[in-house]
Image (cartoon, rainbow, N blue to C red):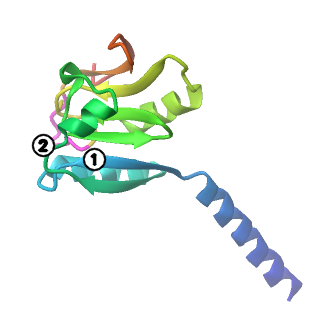
């Protein structure tokens, strides 16, 4: 009987640890976009809990979150106080959040490059960069994929 109680307590502890490790965020997207939904699935598989907010006109949200037109894609997320534009891989977002940058306000994958999370079609993979950006629009390359 004591063994069962110990196992139950262990499972509850593991469950609460894994729940605490979940990073929550909001993704703003068109109600008609399939690749946005696929990106959200990618994020959830990688330990994020993403609330989806459907917007017919997402431009005001992008402006409010500091996304410049040259970095634009089809969806915009707010996670841990940072902005994430487009098909940014979950691993890059995790690394960015863990680094706790002071100057940079987010990451962006401009456009919709094939082979980025949510843009997986027919195994086609185009090279792309993930850009870190600050509130003044200055960028640096954060990561490169499919090189």
Q: As displayed, is residue 65 above or below residue 57?
A: above
Q: Is residue 49 left or right of residue 131?
A: right
Q: Quadrant of the C terminus?
A: top left
Residue 106 pos. (x, y %)? 40, 27
Between marks 1 and 2 in the image, the one whose residue lies nearer the viewer = 1
In the picture of the structure, the residue carrying the numbered disc 2 is 122
Q: Name the N-terminal-most of marks 1 and 2.
A: 1
| Disc 1 secondary structure class | strand
- As drawn, the label of residue 28 is 1
At x 18%, y 47%, the residue is 35
> Is the N terminus in the top left, top right, bottom left or bottom right quadrant?
bottom right
* Helix, strand or loop for disc 2: loop
Residue 95 in the image, given as x and y percentages of width and height? 51, 30
Q: Which residues are magenta?
A: 118-125
Neighbour class for label 2 at 10 Å: few (<14), some, many (≥20)? few
Relative side of 50 to 16, left or right = left
Above/below status of 131 relative to 121: above
User: What secondary structure predominates along the stretch shown in magenta?
Assistant: loop
């Amino acid at each position: 009987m004591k063994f069962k109680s110990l196992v139950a307590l262990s499972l509850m502890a593991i469950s609460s640890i894994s729940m605490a490790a979940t990073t929550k965020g909001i993704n703003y997207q068109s109600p008609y976009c399939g690749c946005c939904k696929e990106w959200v699935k990618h994020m959830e598989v990688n330990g994020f809990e993403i609330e989806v907010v459907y917007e017919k006109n997402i431009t005001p949200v992008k402006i409010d979150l500091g996304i410049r037109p040259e970095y634009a894609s089809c969806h915009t997320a707010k996670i841990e106080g940072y902005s994430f534009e487009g098909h940014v891989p979950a691993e890059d977002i995790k690394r960015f959040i863990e680094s706790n940058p002071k100057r940079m306000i987010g990451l962006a994958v401009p456009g919709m490059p094939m082979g980025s999370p949510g843009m997986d079609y027919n195994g086609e993979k185009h090279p792309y960069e993930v850009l870190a950006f600050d509130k003044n629009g200055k960028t640096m390359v954060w990561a490169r994929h499919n090189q």
